[in-house]
Amino acid sequence: MKSNVEREDILKELFNISVGKSASVLSEIINRKILLNVPNLKIVDLNEKTIAIDDYLPKVMKGAIMVSSIAFKDELRGKASLIFPADKMRTFINLCSNESDDTPFDDMNFTDIDFDILKEVGNIILNSVIGEIGNYLKIKLSYTLPEVKVFNKADFENTINSKEYTHILMLYITFKLDDSEVSGAIIINLTLSSLSELLKKVEMLEDGFNE
């Protein structure tokens, strides 16, 4: 049986492929080059202790955060959330809409148009991440449309520590557009059985490569 480190490395490479494809789609939509990559990934057991988000996402958890989430089911059951600092996403939204980035900013105040842009971004990235992983590992999945919310730190920690899921895949993600770089994350909440099934599929995939 492979170690957690080996399985995390395999998953990281799979996620890098999927976010790379989503970056290509986003680049075509806004006609500007976007780079996305996953420099690190961790598997977190929520049963070990109450998760302190600061331990895992210190760069993301400063001030308000924007979270775009989808739920998925069938062969795996869980929830995937794309997370970025709200002030950095304001810069990204302005770049997408060709607006000035020098206006005063309230990090909890976004318009309906802002949310529509982030829903589309979340839909492209999360659908690509979940969909491509399902394709590579031959796992059947169906998922919801994304929901976008702005959270303060305490409220977001409460959603992460939900008793519905026992484990988290924590993907650190770097988002580059022009001269702007944003550090964020994709958090994938999973049931224990779903994580076990995912890791089993990862091992089967690696064994197939080595035959």
Image (cartoon, rainbow, N blue to C red):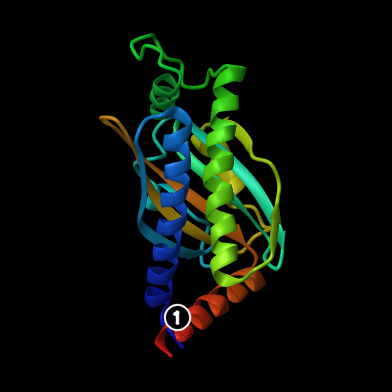
Nearer the observer, 26 or 84: 26
Please indicate whether residue 42 sits to the left or right of residue 131 in the image.
left
Tell me which residue sits at (45%, 23%) in the image. 93
For the residue marked with disc 1, what is the amino acid?
A: Glu
Direction left: furthest residue: 179
To which residue does mark 1 refer?
206
Q: Quadrant of residue 96?
A: top left
Please indicate whether residue 177 sits to the left or right of residue 190 in the image.
left
Please indicate whether residue 73 sits to the left or right of residue 99 in the image.
right
Residue 177: image x %, image y %?
33, 33
Could one spot residue 47 in this view of the protein?
no
Tell me which residue sits at (51%, 62%) in the image. 49
> Count the marks: how many?
1
Residue 154: image x %, image y %?
53, 38
> Can you say which quadrant of the picture contains the C terminus?
bottom left
| Callout 1 secondary element | helix
Could one spot residue 74 in this view of the protein?
yes
Residue 44: image x %, image y %?
48, 63
Residue 208 drawn above or below residue 163: below
Residue 48: image x %, image y %?
51, 67
Direction right: furthest residue: 74
Q: Quadrant of residue 84?
A: top left
Direction top: furthest residue: 103
Nearer the observer, 83 or 48: 83
Q: Residues within 10 Å of mark 1 (few under 14, many from 20)?
A: few
Please indicate whether residue 15 sits to the left or right of residue 197 in the image.
left
